[in-house]
Image (cartoon, rainbow, N blue to C red):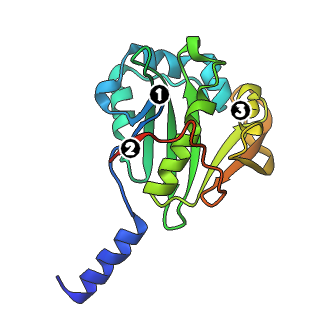
Amino acid sequence: MSEQNGAAGTRQDTLYPQSGPVFIDTRDFVLRSLTPEDADERMLGWLASPEVATGLNIMPMGFDLNGLRKYIAGHDNRAGYLIGIFSKEERLLIGFYSLFVVFPHMHATLTSIIGDKNHVGTRVYWRTVDALLDYFYKNRGIYKIRAPIVARNFRMLFNFMQNSRFVLEAVLRNESVVPTGGRTDVLMFTSFSDDGKGNPEFGIRNAEL
């Protein structure tokens, strides 16, 4: 390898410090990167539901099973992650986090869905997000993680307003078009890797790349 190529390789390693599937084992849940084999009718139903679409401020996603597999495969576990939330008690996928990283700035944007209605309102985010943040800060070199929440998504706003790991960094006025008409504000909640607020109770018990 030439000196020039070697320097380029070093820069590439800096831009992409670690990559690969995520696996996080917490007290009650397993968070892991989804694969196309995880695609099923339940996930299709979540993405097509008006409740999920309203929370994300999008139109319902009209995937078929093959389209869902392609969507999952499009996350490379480097710049884009789709991380399933699995209940240990039921051994069941109940939702997922998506996270997209901006290189070389090492900040990421986080969105999430709890698709299984039996787990809506059971504080799943509170019981999993600490582990997710700690993992990406410690293992993937991320500095800050932002969670944009549309102003009408009251349930998700409650989760982030009451979470000490996130601060309300900005209110983006009329930031997004509402699919049904009009515009809506977006509240930007942000977490920082150096906040010193890792939560050992809900934190990582075992993590593998």
Q: Considering depth in this image, is 132 or 12 the residue closer to the camera?
A: 132
Residue at horizontal 47 percent and vertical 34 percent from the top: 26
* Lower position in the chain sequence, tag 1 or tag 2: 1
Query: Label 2: which residue?
Result: 207
Tally the numbered discs: 3
- Element marked by disc 3: helix
Looking at this view, name the residue that lies furthest to the top: 118
- Element marked by disc 2: strand
Query: Label 3: which residue?
Result: 159
* Lower position in the chain sequence, tag 2 or tag 3: 3
Q: Position of residue 68 (x, y in %)?
A: 38, 27
Q: Is residue 103 left or right of residue 144?
A: left
Residue at horizontal 54 percent and vertical 66 percent from the top: 105
Q: Callout 2, which amino acid? A: Ala
Q: Quadrant of residue 40?
A: top left
Q: Which mark is residue 29?
A: 1
Above-or-below relation of 163 to 3 = above
Question: From mark 1 to mark 3, how far is it between C-alphas?
Answer: 18 Å
* Lower position in the chain sequence, tag 1 or tag 3: 1
Q: Is residue 107 visible?
A: yes
Question: From mark 2 to mark 3, how far is it between C-alphas?
Answer: 25 Å
Residue at horizontal 16 percent and vertical 82 percent from the top: 1
Q: Callout 3, which amino acid? A: Asn
Q: Is residue 22 visible?
A: no
Q: Position of residue 84 (x, y in %)?
A: 44, 31
Q: Position of residue 56 (x, y in %)?
A: 64, 31
| Contact (Cβ within 8 Å) of mark 1 with mark 3 | no
Looking at this view, name the residue that lies furthest to the bottom: 3
Q: Considering depth in this image, is 195 or 33 the residue closer to the camera?
A: 195
Q: Callout 1, which amino acid? A: Phe
